[in-house]
Amino acid sequence: MPGRRTHEAIASDIAAAKPPLTPAQALVQAERCHYCHDAPCVTACPTGIDIPSFIARIAQGNLRGAASAILEANPLGGMCARVCPTEVLCEDACVRHTLEDKPVEIGLLQRHATDALFAKPGAPLFTRAEPTGRRVAVVGAGPAGLACAHGLARAGHDVVVFEARAKGGGLNEYGIASYKATGDFAQAELDWLLSIGGIELRTGVALGDAITLESLRADFDAVFLGLGLAGVNTLGIPEPGAEAAAGLADAVDFIAELRQASDLSAVPVGRHVLVIGGGMTAVDAAVQSKLLGAETVTIAYRRGAEAMPASAHERAWAQTHGVSIRYWAAPEAVLAEGGQVTGVRFAATRLDGGKLVPTGETFVLHADRVLRAIGQTFVAAPVGAAFRLEQGRIATDGEGRTSLPGVWAGGDCCAGGRDLTVEAVEHGKVAARSIDAALRQQPAAPESRHG
């Protein structure tokens, strides 16, 4: 049910969950940096941000210069500062982490610089090159698609971004915890990115419906696919039908509902919530359930803590907010009574020769709200059988080229990725450079192609 807490109380807790640095705190953190010449933090950053350079500029009071250094390498650097697992990327590689067990707070410093720019943008940081007369279609307005579009626009190409949902932003808008990006930041960053010009965003247009891959290849000089993961894995166990079990839902839908809610107290939450899964989506859904007023929230994961996809930092974050984590618990059946979920029966598990096996014991975790958070899958139907796939996702080379000429892809829809926003941005950047190089080597397309 909704209304377990007031909108004001929820909003206050969300805003306070991950506060930004004050100017004094930012200066203290910036002065802790050793400004390493061959900085391991830069190597650990998927987008290769020159971290010592932007931190030095913060120390000098040059926040605009710091933001410029960040956004030059990562055009979605503001959101990545909020959602990146910096504790296992740049901050884990920080030499302070090795020497003192406390790294420089790189993520918060990156947020400090980019927030200052978005608060007072001033003159544009980046301008477009001379128009090339080429048009590129980008499918998906998520991190990969937006990064690709921005890179292509800077190179002078005209870009049309097609997005199936009502808003651009992709995962940044619909798929992350509200406490990670407050104040409609995803849309503010999107507006800034589009302000470079040369990018047209068309929302409510889905591939395979209003447009097809064949029509895009015919009408544009190149195509980039940033489709993300539209499918949700099932538990693979007996589940009551939706009409017979109120309270059973996918965690991604719950998070999206919360992200789009104008009144946070109106989002329904269970009194006793059970989240099945072990990744960051599970943690985000669990913590937000607690913030909405759930009395008890439990994450159930089939293996031990060391195998859990969510980092130790994320697990500690959940537990600090009153979420319990139950390890070695494999779901066997969702239980319901009178049309309402009542819990899940689990099999206790253990490792035997490296293989996960049941111990023979079972137990029930009672809940009136069960959220599935066991991963998402690539839905290939919109692109048909056009591509070579690897492990159920689109296979690409090192520059994002697919097996179909003239089509590039990036982000979570591609094989071999880690499903990270910052990695998706890098895919988009690399593909934009590759598309630009390919278009400049080709003769101009007939004018009718752009009609």
Image (cartoon, helix red, strand yellow):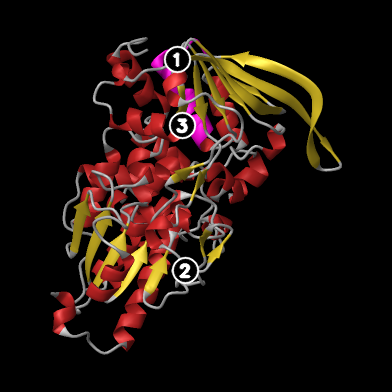
Residue 37 position in % (x across, y down): 54, 63
Q: Residue at the location (58% across, 45% down)?
A: 88
Q: Whole-Å distance between the Cαs marked 2 and 3? A: 29 Å
Of helix, strand and loop, which mostly describes the magenta segment?
A: helix
Q: Which structural element holds mark 1?
A: loop
Residue 144 position in % (x across, y down): 38, 57
Left or right: 334 as drawn, with respect to 285:
right
Asked if labels 1 and 2 touch by Cβ distance under 8 angstroms, the answer is no
Q: For mark 1, does the 10 Å Cα neighbourhood hold few (<14), some (14 to 19), or many (20 or more) residues? A: many
Check residue 295 for magenta coloring: yes
In the rendered image, the vertical position of residue 122 relative to residue 285, given as above or below:
below
Q: Quadrant of residue 451?
A: bottom left
In the rendered image, the vertical position of residue 30 relative to residue 215, given as above or below:
above
Residue 270, numbered label: 1
Task: Tell which residue pokes out farthest to the bottom in this image.
Answer: 443
Looking at the image, is mark 2 or mark 3 earlier in the sequence? Answer: 3
Count of labels shown?
3
Name the residue beneath numbered marker 3: 250
Looking at the image, is mark 2 or mark 1 earlier in the sequence? Answer: 1
Looking at the image, is mark 1 or mark 3 earlier in the sequence? Answer: 3
Left or right: 301 as drawn, with respect to 348:
left
- Tell me which segment is drawn in magenta: 281-296
Closer-to-camera residue (314/259): 259
Residue 121 position in % (x across, y down): 20, 49
Residue 192 position in % (x across, y down): 22, 51
